[in-house]
Amino acid sequence: MSRPAKDIKQQLNLIVDRRNKIAHEADIDPTLNLGEHWNIDESMVNDAVDFIEQVVENIHQIL
């Protein structure tokens, strides 16, 4: 990947953090009223999936 390792790790951490919010916190933003979910849309999901696919493909090329 043409990005610095620091940027790749940061992006992966953001994806994992969001996944954990969805899985363990019902994706609810604690700073808003009870029941208000964090913003997410199809584009955000597609970007995360595309990024993870790139990481996997690069790991596969190395191995």
Image (cartoon, rainbow, N blue to C red):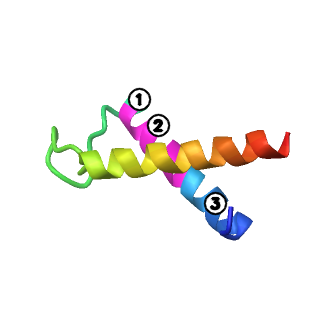
Q: Quadrant of the C terminus?
A: top right
Find out whether the residues at labels 2 and 1 contact each other: C-beta distance under 8 Å.
yes
Residue 34, position as x, y percentages in the image: 16, 41
2 on left or right of 50:
right
- Please say if 25 is above or below 8: above
Q: CA distance from mark 2 to mark 1?
A: 5 Å
Q: CA distance from mark 3 to mark 1?
A: 23 Å
Q: Is residue 18 on the magenta stretch?
A: yes
Q: Which disc, if any, is residue 20?
A: 2
Q: Is residue 25 on the magenta stretch?
A: no
Q: Amino acid at mark 2?
A: Asn
| Depth check, front residue: 63 or 11 | 63
Residue appearing at x 57%, y 52% in the figure: 13
The secondary element bearing badge 2 is classed as: helix
For disc 3, the neighbor class at 10 Å (few under 14, some 14 to 19, many from 20) is some
- The segment highlighted magenta reads 13-22
| Depth check, front residue: 39 or 46 | 46
Mark nearest the camera among 3 and 1 is 3
For disc 1, the neighbor class at 10 Å (few under 14, some 14 to 19, many from 20) is few
- Please say if 30 is above or below 3: above
Question: Of label 2 and label 3, which has the lower sequence position?
Answer: 3
- Please say if 28 is above or below 10: above
Give the labeled residue for mark 1. 23
- When asked about the image quadrant of residue 31, the answer is bottom left
The secondary element bearing badge 3 is classed as: helix
The secondary element bearing badge 1 is classed as: helix
For disc 2, the neighbor class at 10 Å (few under 14, some 14 to 19, many from 20) is few
